[in-house]
């Protein structure tokens, strides 16, 4: 397989942007991973942060953490006239509600935030914790299972149900990553 090395134009869900350095796979903790697969969107106007606010979305699917797993993250940076003068950002990070509002084309990808090639971050533990504390909204988010019923999330068999659905969840995640142009190892 040929791996692009240089920055290049790339669109995700019809949003123009730039894909940045994609290195050939590297071995990290006995696993082959891509250490850098990052896409940055065009800028779009955003209100509420300062004068001439512009949002840029960054999507990563790589092993920047060097833990042997490629992990997906979708974050944003907001620049304003004031922040540009400071050579800084006005806001940044998991601005998912703003991303949904300003870049609705990317909203379907937000569910994958912090998902790695082996599943959501602390998939079973986080889901069970939130379900046991009756925060079923967080439990659904942790499980990437928006259609889960209250009965399913409070079931005595929750762990088994989560483990049973994990292969299909990973397959759907992989399909989305490959569809938007990231390399899965």
Image (tube, rainbow, N blue to C red):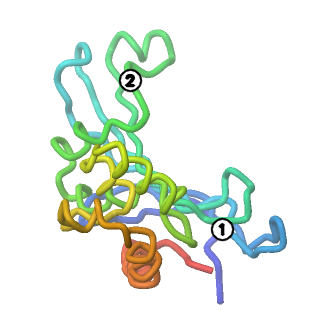
Q: Give the percent coordinates (x, y) of residue 45.
A: 20, 33
Work out which residue is located at the far bottom of the displayed protein and give it: 1
Give whichever of discs 2 and 1 has the lower sequence position. Answer: 1
Task: Say which element carries label 1.
Answer: loop
Quadrant of the snapshot with the N terminus: bottom right
The residue singled out by tag 1 in the image is: 5
Q: Residue at x 30, y 35 (%)?
A: 55
Please tell me which residue lies in front, 119 or 48: 119
Q: In the rendering, which numbered label is found on residue 91? A: 2
Q: Residue at x 37, y 75 (%)?
A: 176
Q: Residues within 10 Å of mark 1 (few under 14, many from 20)?
A: few
Q: Give the percent coordinates (x, y) of residue 104.
A: 17, 52
Image-quadrant location for residue 79: top left
* Image-based side of 33 in relation to 80, left or right: right
- Mark 2 or 1: in front is 2
Q: Residues within 10 Å of mark 2 (few under 14, many from 20)?
A: some
Please tell me which residue lies in front, 125 or 80: 125
Task: Say which element carries label 2.
Answer: strand
Q: Residue at x 49, y 62 (%)?
A: 124
């Amino acid at each position: 397989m040929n791996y692009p090395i240089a920055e290049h134009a790339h669109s995700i869900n019809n949003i123009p942007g730039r894909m940045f350095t994609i290195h050939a796979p590297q071995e990290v903790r006995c696993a082959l991973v891509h250490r850098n697969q990052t896409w940055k969107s065009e800028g779009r106007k955003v209100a509420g942060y300062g004068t001439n606010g512009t949002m840029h979305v960054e999507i990563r699917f790589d092993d920047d953490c060097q833990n042997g797993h490629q992990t997906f993250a979708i974050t944003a940076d907001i620049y304003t006239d004031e922040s540009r003068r400071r050579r800084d950002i006005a806001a940044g990070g998991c601005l998912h509600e703003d991303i949904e509002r300003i870049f609705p084309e990317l909203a379907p990808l937000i569910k994958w935030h912090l998902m790695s090639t082996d599943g959501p971050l602390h998939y079973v533990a986080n889901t069970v914790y939130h379900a046991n504390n009756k925060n079923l909204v967080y439990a659904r988010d942790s499980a990437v299972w928006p259609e889960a019923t209250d009965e399913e999330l409070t079931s005595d068999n929750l762990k088994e149900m989560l483990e049973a659905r994990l292969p299909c969840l990973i397959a759907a995640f992989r399909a989305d990553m490959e569809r938007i142009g990231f390399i899965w190892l």
